[in-house]
Image (tube, rainbow, N blue to C red):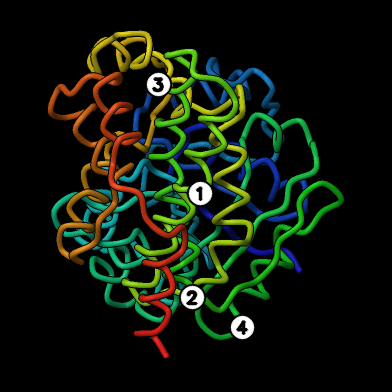
Amino acid sequence: MTEKIAIIGGGSWGATLADLLAQNGHDVVLWEFFPEAAEALRTARTLKVMPQLDLHRSVAVTSNLGEALAGRTLLVSAVPSEFVRRTWRSIRENGVFPSNGWVLSVTKGIENDSLKRMSEIVSEEIPAASGRVAVLSGPSHAEEVARRLPTVVVTAGPGDFPARVQTLFKSEAFRVYTSPDTIGVELGGALKNIYAIACGICDGLGLGDNAKAALMTRGLNEMTRVGLASGAQAITFTGLSGLGDLIVTCTSKHSRNRALGEKIGQGKTLQQALSEMTMVAEGVVTSRSAYQLGQKLGLDLPIIEDIYRCLHEGKSAKESLRDLMTRPVSDEMFRVAKLLEKTK
């Protein structure tokens, strides 16, 4: 069945999902905040930052929020994490949320200070959407999805909504699994960006594959501990939104977070690195909120803490490396096991 869908956010991921859904026969409107960017996308049907995209001819592009949401049954939230709250607050204040609307959040991040996940922000700003918000995450670089390269992701949410999402997106090149763990799926997608920055720093310093493997493995351990302390299921972090997304984001040439980390490892400041980026690296914002979350939960998260200090307090990458390597030794899984005991 054809569904009326609004994609909120005209960046690379939002535009790619709009194209994918249109290819599946759905009625899709894509909302872009900047009028000039909306006009450029409407005309060129591609993005300068992602020429692989050939936006389906049926996708309507607009910068008018009311026009984009009118009559839509599914709203896909694809704006960067730092703009999610203000976007959804604008939707509420302008009274344009469809009375029968469902929301799928595809943004990966944790809000600074409030420490809310993206689905929580949507529900908080749009009370009418409470109980009707799902999430989509997993190893899914837009550059490859746009080229129809095989991609597998996971969705989680209330009731039969995840099964509906599966059907909407299913194609020969895009496969969706379901999960009962919304918290874990969101946290995995958000936290992996921090470890991708760490692996990029590793590349910038020329530390080799052994160090990157260690960072990814210990990052997965940290991620699992944050998840368990937040009410997620440990097994979620061995899946697509945990290990899967961690692998692709820490190793891919398409990874913005890995690329930013590499610049930091080469000795550039955060401001210098960001000035050379053409797209958003979500891990920069999330590193602050993840650090705050760890402090709130009383967790020892050495990689998150050192990446936070490198990005926001001026600590050098070499100093962080020394501190991580000279920490007191311990049992590999002791802290995960202790948290698992508490959840029984």
Residue in the foreground of this view, choosing between 124 and 272: 272
Earlier-in-chain disc, 4 versus 2: 4
The amino acid marked with disc number 3 is Leu
CB within 8 Å, label 4 to label 1: no
Q: Which residue is mark 1?
A: 7
Q: Which residue is mark 3?
A: 260
User: What secondary structure is marked by label 1?
Assistant: strand
43 w.r.t. 220: above or below: above
Mark 4 → mark 2, Cα distance in angstroms: 20 Å
Q: Which residue is mark 2?
A: 233
Mark 1 vs mark 2: in front: 2
User: What secondary structure is marked by label 4?
Assistant: loop
Instruction: Give the left or right position of residue 299, taking residue 50 as reference.
Output: left
Q: Quadrant of the C terminus?
A: bottom left
The amino acid marked with disc number 1 is Ile
Mark 4 vs mark 2: in front: 2
Earlier-in-chain disc, 1 versus 3: 1
317 w.r.t. 339: above or below: above
Mark 4 → mark 3, Cα distance in angstroms: 38 Å
Q: Quadrant of the N terminus?
A: bottom right
